[in-house]
Structure formats: C-alpha cells, structure tokens
Image (cartoon, rainbow, N blue to C red):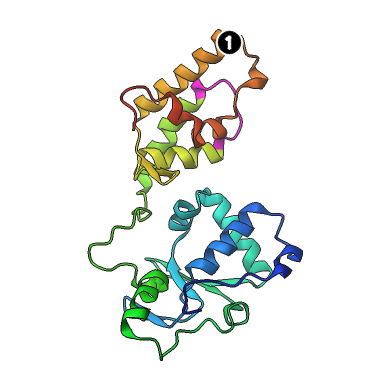
Amino acid sequence: MGGDYIKVSRSLLDWEWYRDINTKVLFLHMLLKANWKDGRFEGTTVPRGSFVSSVRKLACETELTEREIRTAISHLKTTGEVTSKTTNKYSVFTVVNYDLYQSGDTQSDTQTTNERQPNDILTTTIEEKKEGKKDICTSEPVPSDMEEQLQKDFGIIYAKYPKKRGRSRAFEYYRGYVTTGRLVNRKRYRLTNRQIYQAIAAYVLEREEEGAELKYYQDFSTFMNKTILDYLGDDGE
C-alpha cells in the first residue's frame, strides 16, 4: 500500500471501546498519525508504529478537550492498545500492535524515486516539520501565572452565562480561543475576553426576546464549542 493508507478490520466493531466516541476517535487518529517506517526526531529514533506528539496537539487535531484526550489515552493504555514515553518537551506514542494491524504496509523498494516521494511526504509524520511547513496545532505550554489569570477571567465570564453546565469543558474551549487560537472546522479563531462577553450577551438577549425558558438554553460548553462563533458581531474572528 506504500504507506498511503491504513487498514481497519471489521473486528473493530466488537472492540470494547468502540462505543466510546472519544477513545475510538483518538485510536483511529493515532493509527493515521503513526509512522509507517522508522525515522528520527531531534536525535531520537521513532520506530514504525510510533509518532511524536503531545496531549495539547492531539486535542487540537481531534477537537477533543485535553481532559478527554487524557481519559482516552488512559483507556487505550489500560487495554494495551497504546503506550507512551514522555520527555520534558514531547511524548512518543506507540500503537502496540501496529505491525499486526498494518501487515503488508511497507514501501516497495522497486518504486521509482518520483513514485516514492509523495508517499514520504504524506505519511512519514516525523518529517512533517520540514522547513516552510506551518503546523497550526503547535502551541507552547501556558505558564502557571497565565493559567491562574485564565481561570480568573473565565470565572467572570462563566458567571454571566445563565445555564451553569459544562464548566470544565467550556474552560478548555475558552483557553484555546484566548491563547493560541482554537481550530473549528479547519479555521482558527482567536478571541478576546471582550468578544466572548459580547457574544454571550447577544445570545442571552436573543433567548430572552424569544421568551425561552432556561432549560432551552444551551449548556455553556456547547455554546463555547461552536455556537459562540455565530454571535461574534462585526469584530469577530
């Protein structure tokens, strides 16, 4: 297959995590991200079936929250699908039975150079940091003092929203919007606290004018996920 594709067995339908949407999404994402041939990253060998990433980057790429990613990783580790080794800079994730899942997924040495080059670019994830290629899901860790300020600012915003549900997940969305920007439907949105507050005010005003009961308001996490983008006004994005 030249590394262009991954194999997915129908036995996945009987997998114990199949009905856990977050765990299933992350596992399939990891199969797609895993290197199909050995390579190196910052002086470290990253073997076939492994890839370099982080919880934050996986959250960005899958649009799950960091908490959901950690929970899904815990599930996958518990049942032996995935292992990981973490440094102070990044983590190396390994799909344990990658060779079993992807048997026959090797690059043919008989292919011409012109045929092989596209496959290398498409599938060798440890080579994705080629010069000039921008990774929109790369972000630096948030300093502890900044995290405290984010929590404080979010608390003020959260207090303004009538339906107090989904706080922890809403905070993950909020942090994405106000730090590096949050990827939604392949488009990155970076918002200020003022924009977020105005969007909430516009949404609440609309619900009040409709005479909607509180139970018909969206949970705060649902609003912060995508609905907020519909209420940004002219200075949004």
Say above or below: 190 vs 119.
above
Q: Which residue is mark 1?
A: 210
Expressed as whole percent of the image width and height from the top left, the position of residue 37 reads 44, 82
Horizontally, is 201 left or right of 133 in the view?
right
96 or 34: which is nearer to us? 34
Q: Residue at x 49, y 38 (%)?
A: 171
The image quadrant of residue 214 is top right
Expressed as whole percent of the image width and height from the top left, the position of residue 100 reads 62, 81
Q: Residue at x 70, y 60 (%)?
A: 17
Expressed as whole percent of the image width and height from the top left, the position of residue 13 reads 73, 63
Expressed as whole percent of the image width and height from the top left, the position of residue 29 reads 53, 62
The image quadrant of residue 98 is bottom right
Task: Determine the main secondary structure of the stretch shown in magenta.
Answer: loop
Residues shaded magenta: 159-167
Say above or below: 115 vs 140.
below
Say above or below: 139 vs 228.
below
Q: Residue at x 23, y 62 (%)?
A: 132
Q: Residue at x 51, y 23 (%)?
A: 159
Q: Label 1 is placed on what type of residue?
A: Glu
